[in-house]
Amino acid sequence: MQTLAMPADLSLKAGRFFYGIAYMNERHSHTDDFADRPLPYRAMLNTVYLDDGVQLRWLAPTDTFLEFGRELMRGAQ
């Protein structure tokens, strides 16, 4: 589940999803513009981390993209 429009530029996501710990981790590998993910990414994260949880993000109203977020995950994966 993911909200589409919340007040104050907030976004809420709940359910099973990819952790937001790396730039590429939140994306499915088939959306990459290359055959394999970068070696440091594969070595440190070993493909992707996903789990059940809740994520809250806030997009700051600035000219520069600035986003803050918190995740609370079950920790089973």
Image: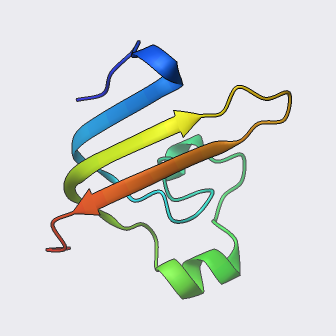
Residue 4 point in image, percent of width and height: 39, 15
- Relative placement, left or right, of 27 versus 19 is right
In the displayed structure, would residue 55 be above or below residue 7? below
Q: Is residue 47 above or below residue 62?
A: below
Image quadrant where residue 52 sits: bottom left
> Residue 49's spot in the image, x, y percent?
36, 68
Colouring mode (rainbow / by chain / secondary structure / one colour): rainbow
Count of residue discs: 0
Furthest toward the bottom, the residue is: 43
Residue found 55% across the figure and 85% down from its top: 44
What residue do we see at 64% from left, 65% from top? 36
Can you tell which quarter of the image residue 42 is in?
bottom right
Residue drawn 63% across the image and 66% down it? 37
Q: At which x and y percent is residue 77?
A: 20, 73
Answer with left or right where residue 23 lies relative to residue 63: left
From the top left corner, tell me how far across and down residue 73 is, in percent. 23, 63
Residue at 84% in and 35% down: 64
Q: Is residue 61 above or below residue 53?
A: above
In the image, is 46 to the left or to the right of 55? right
Q: Image quadrant for the N terminus?
A: top left
